[in-house]
Amino acid sequence: MTNEMWQEAVKLLDSMVYSKSTQAGARHYALKDRIRFLTLGLVCANKVIEQQRYGEISEGPLGSIQVDSDYIFKLRVHIELAELQLEIYEALVNKLDDLAEKKARRSGAESKRMATRASSSDASSGRKEVEMRDYLSRLDKGLYDINELYDTALKLRLWECCLSILKFSNSKTPHVVKRIWKNIICEQINKALKGDGSWREQVLEALPRRFVKSPEVFPLAYICGLLEEYNNKYIRDNSDPELTLKLFRELRVPLRDQIQAYTQLMGETHRGREVVNTVERIARGAIDRKGNELEENAAGLLTLLSTAEVKTSTDAMMKSLVELKQQIQRLLG
């Protein structure tokens, strides 16, 4: 491409990205097209800046566009925002597919009583479907800003998308993050309690794993606290004393983070026997595995066990905690 063609490409792609599909006579570009245009626009804009640097073309605005570092930054941000918008779009498509599956299952109901219930339920799901399809259409017609994205994800109860947006925005709102995680867990519990499966397995399977290494949107101590609380509250089937340990194994949570999470939980006055039991299991597992991880985190683990001693209410648990501390000290020589 000639120097002038790179400039023209920037102008053309910019106009295509930000065109309003609602304008009369405007061509409709789908969301995926706009993401592609943004990516190509970034390539072309970088080329223009490179040519300006070497004097191949003169610096200055291209019509209403000033191609400089600010413009490059804007394109990068808009690419990330558009990808978040696509995440919402695809999550909504999945939700519509789930709704269609439920409708198909209900249509197979044979008894009159079930049919009556289904008709009422179908009316409600029909309204939901219309609303969701309307959102799909709007999401595909233009680019949203960060506030519009979050409001849309929140209204549609797309909790994982909410976490993605909060992570992108570097939001310092731990109370909001905690509320979203409570919604994620409670939603899975409610689904499972309506069926025959174990809610514990369903919750562990549904937890968004991609946020594990982002503590600002993955409050491990809070998540463990909820699981400890609900493990004994929503029993229906037998409670699972190793529920949070299964979480640690599935998500490969380092011993250091396990200790930090339960040290935080131990500091909460309303926490009781179930948290002490988990601390004992964390220590026992670390001793069984031995190795560098235990050596590196021994001090924290010993402190945690001492805190658990204060919290325990039985002689048997007190004896177990003391023995675990002695085993760790012996392993350390």
Image: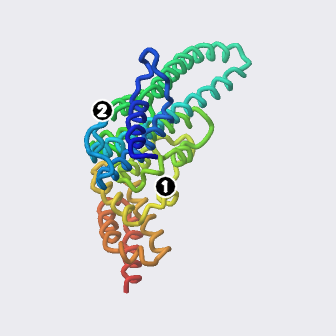
Give the residue drawn at x 64%, y 23%: 103
**Left or right of 194, for residue 64:** left
Question: How was this image coloured?
Answer: rainbow
Give the residue drawn at x 42%, y 35%: 13
| Residue 163 seen anywhere in this rendered image of the structure | no
- Going by the numbered disc 1, the residue's amino acid type is Leu
Which structural element holds mark 2? loop
Q: Which mark is residue 63?
A: 2
Q: Residues within 10 Å of mark 1 (few under 14, many from 20)?
A: some
Q: Which mark is residue 247?
A: 1
Say if 24 sits above or below 194 in the image: above
Q: Residues within 10 Å of mark 2 (few under 14, many from 20)?
A: few
Q: CA distance from mark 2 to mark 1?
A: 55 Å
- Going by the numbered disc 2, the residue's amino acid type is Gly
Q: Earlier in the sequence, mark 2 or mark 1?
A: 2
Give the residue drawn at x 33%, y 71%: 302
Say if 68 sits above or below 12 in the image: below
* Front position in the image: 46 or 280: 46
| Residue 119 seen anywhere in this rendered image of the structure | yes
Say if 36 sits above or below 318 in the image: above
* Quarter of image, res 138: top left
Q: Position of residue 122 (x, y in %)?
A: 60, 17
